[in-house]
Image (spheres, rainbow, N blue to C red):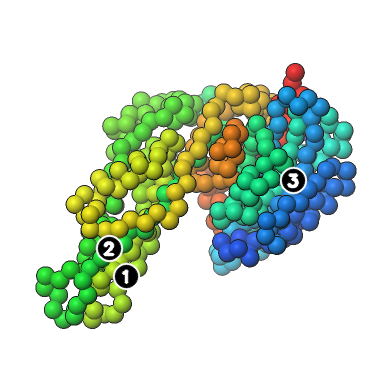
Amino acid sequence: MGSAPDRPAGEVVELLSELIRNACVNDGTADSGHEHRSADVLSQYLGETGLDVARVTARPGRDNLVARIEGWDPTAPTLLLLGHTDVVPVSPGGWSRDPFGGEVVDGEVWGRGAVDMLNMTASMAVAMRHLASQNFRPRGTLVYAAVADEEALGTWGAGHLVEHEGDAVRADYVITEAGGFQVPTAAGPRLPVMVAEKGYYWCRITVAGTPGHASQPFATDNAVITAAEVVRRLADYRPEARIDPWWRRFVDGVFPDLSGPLTDAQGLDALCGELPVALGRLTHACTHTTLAPTVIHGGTKTNVIPDEVTVEIDIRTLPGQQTRDIERMLDDALGDLRAAVTITVVDDNGSTASPADTALWQTLGRVSSRLVEGSALVPFLSVGATDARFFRRAGSVAYGFALFSRRLGYEDYAAMFHGNDERVDVDSLALTTALWEATAIDLLTAS
Ligand SMILES: [Zn+2]
């Protein structure tokens, strides 16, 4: 297979536009999403070739779809191509085109989900159908799943499948979002593979005070004032930088000239402040536990000294960190105020990681270097949560990966993720489709 994918991209463009037009918007409520619309489209599209397609519905309207091409050797590995069909809401005023129009303009498909991640969900289905129509009979099994509810907590999608339909989706290797944008370097394009993702620890800090008349505030126990100090301490808290092996490898591959300073834990905080802001922010998030106070509620009336304020904190954890590590950080950050507040854990969802240098890593490296000339893989960390976490916890090696053309660089990609004017170019769709087919053939037919 040459560097220019030979398949006309029309099929994936058409399917992607249709998924965009289905507008499966997940606003976080249980009855949003309506992913049955895209499950219908995909089950018809895949079913036409005689593929074995199953629907799994944990809640009416929130349909998941699983299709498989059974391998002939039960000892050979199973590969799961995992896409989600839901998308996040839009702010229509910020868009220059209809966010749910699925229009193709100047070689790009426009609409919510074009990069997160209907592009992958559609191209995975096209590859699956193409392989099935060629009577692909691999040694290992190929599974495709299009799931609901990734943009909330995965309760009706990947979480449900792994917990209740394990046999349908169990896989040695899983590929899902995100990654694979080309990072240009002097040595050739580097392609980040998400081998891990940060965990999240969401908690609520309740600060108590003593109510009283606000006309005599001297020496009162005002919960708003204590909460302000709690927030200040959290904002000032500086968790230590941690230089993990994957980060070293990423920096060596992408910023070889900066590999000294970018892997120096002592100087890294100062360096983050000197980098361009987006890069500094990402570098910081990849090497630190982060704490962000995000919501504050308190007080009842202008003339009443408040007796309760709650502060919500979004903490993002690094691979290997345990709940007790986070509790210790909160103790450190709050100091003598720790005893004066109550901390309630809202959600504690640990980080997950897969090793690099697996058979899947080797396959993706081989296949990508054929599709993107001179490219090489580098490991990277997803700072947000994806459905990969459910599969890693169930024992799978899960990576976030795809391929994008040079037209869609990291900055555009990052800005469009949950942003305005989301769109993907047709060349990227063709590259990604070719990637799935070649990956399935390489990994599942090897002896
Ligand atoms: Zn996504």
> Under tag 1, what secondary structure?
strand
Q: Pick whichever, 15 or 79, lies toward us.
A: 79
Q: Which mark is residue 207?
A: 2
Q: Pick whichever, 288 or 69, lies toward us.
A: 69
Lower sequence index among marks 3 and 2: 3
| Ligand 1 closer than 8 Å to label 3 CB | no
Q: Which mark is residue 307?
A: none
Is residue 345 at all visible to an observer of this figure? Answer: yes
Q: Identity of the amino acid at label 1?
A: Gly
The vertical placement of 96 against 186, above or below, is: below
Q: x, y percentage for residue 403?
A: 64, 37
Q: Pick whichever, 378 or 103, lies toward us.
A: 378
Residue in view at x 27 percent, y 63 percent: 207
| Ligand 1 closer than 8 Å to label 1 CB | no
Residue in view at x 64 percent, y 27 percent: 360
In space, the residues marked 1 and 2 are separated at their CA atoms by 9 Å
The vertical placement of 267 against 117, above or below, is: above
Is residue 427 at all visible to an observer of this figure? Answer: no
> Under tag 2, what secondary structure?
strand
Closest to the camera, between mark 1 and mark 2, is 2
- Decide: marks 1, 2 in contact (CB < 8 A)? yes
The vertical placement of 121 against 57, above or below, is: above
Q: Which mark is residue 298?
A: 1
Residue neighbourhood size for the residue with mark 1, other residues' Cα within 10 Å, grouped as few (<14), some (14–19), many (≥20): some
The residue that label 3 is drawn on is 66
